[in-house]
Amino acid sequence: MLPQNNLGPALQIFASGLLFVAFSALIFWPLEEIFEGEKAARPKLKDLAYLWFYQSYGLWIAAGIVYECAFLLRRLLPHPWVGFVQHQPYWLQAIAALLMAEIWVYCAHRLSHCSEFLWKFHSVHHTLEEMTWSGASRQHPFDFLFIIVGANLPALVLGIDLRSIAVLVMLERVYTVLLHSNLNLDWGWFSRVVASPRLHRTHHQPDGHRKNYAGILSFLDVLGKTYQPPSPEP
């Protein structure tokens, strides 16, 4: 039995995952039902369990790995570099953290489709072909850690404000649920800059696995010549 003083944080982490699932369900489930009707996929218990775990204990496990790796790697950097970064405006640090994270997501995601070893883990996510908000975190644990640790490690090594990293993680988590929802949303020409649900749906089709790797910033696909616009709606 855990000591009483250790139960508080453990329960808070447990509850944080439940709150994220509840928030996602309250926002995206009604929207799918209203706008997609019979096309809306009903949440599966397994997918809800994935969503809860990765948005609670999964994030904390990843945070522990990132923190330990950053502590070791930061000692290799010249001290003036870290000081220079920490003296930059908060908004600039946030933009830098987002760009570094998204570049990693694009590169790691693309590599996961090219490497047989990484595909063994990433293919779990691609069992999601019928898009739905609840399936956003259907991932192998290795695939989850490979993406999220690499995405956040550079910012922490450079000493970027932790508030920027926290905001980035929350933005990425919520936007990931939106991207995997069954909502017929597209941003028009702006989808070449920021990904839309219709754009990401293309990636999850069997003939689209080698396109649209980016997480949030789809202009990385444009630069990498892997951008494919969504098919016109009939």
Image: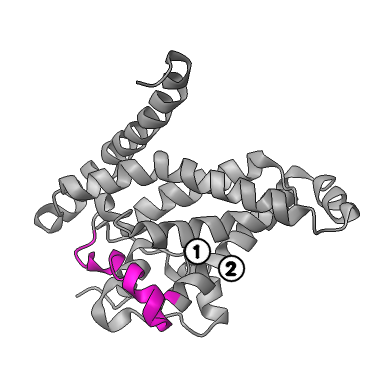
- Please state the horizontal and vertical placement of residue 60, each as a whole percent of the image: 48, 41
**SS at mark 2?**
helix
Residue 100 lies in what quarter of the image?
bottom right
Check the image and report above or below for 212 versus 135.
below
Q: For this rendering, which residue is in front, 159 or 227?
A: 159
Visible in this render: residue 195? yes
Residue 76 tag number? none
The answer to which of 24 and 159 lies nearer the viewer is 159
Asked if one can make out residue 229 in the rendered structure from this viewpoint, the answer is no
Residue drawn at point x = 50 percent, y = 71 percent: 108
Which amino acid, by three-letter code, is at mark 2? Answer: Ile
Kind of residue indicated by mark 1:
Val
Q: Residues within 10 Å of mark 2 (few under 14, many from 20)?
A: some
Tell me the element at label 1: loop
Residue at (50%, 64%) from the top-left corner? 194
Which residue is nearer to you in this view: 117 or 108? Answer: 117
Q: Quadrant of the N terminus?
A: top left
Magenta stretch holds residue 168: no
Mark drawn on residue 194: 1
Quadrant location, the C terminus:
bottom left
Residue 99 as seen in the image, left or right of residue 25: right
Name the spot of residue 197 as percent of width and height, x first: 35, 62
Task: Specify the segment rendered in magenta.
Answer: 112-131
Residue that carries the numbered disc 2 in the rendered image = 103
> Which mark is first along the chain, 2 or 1?
2
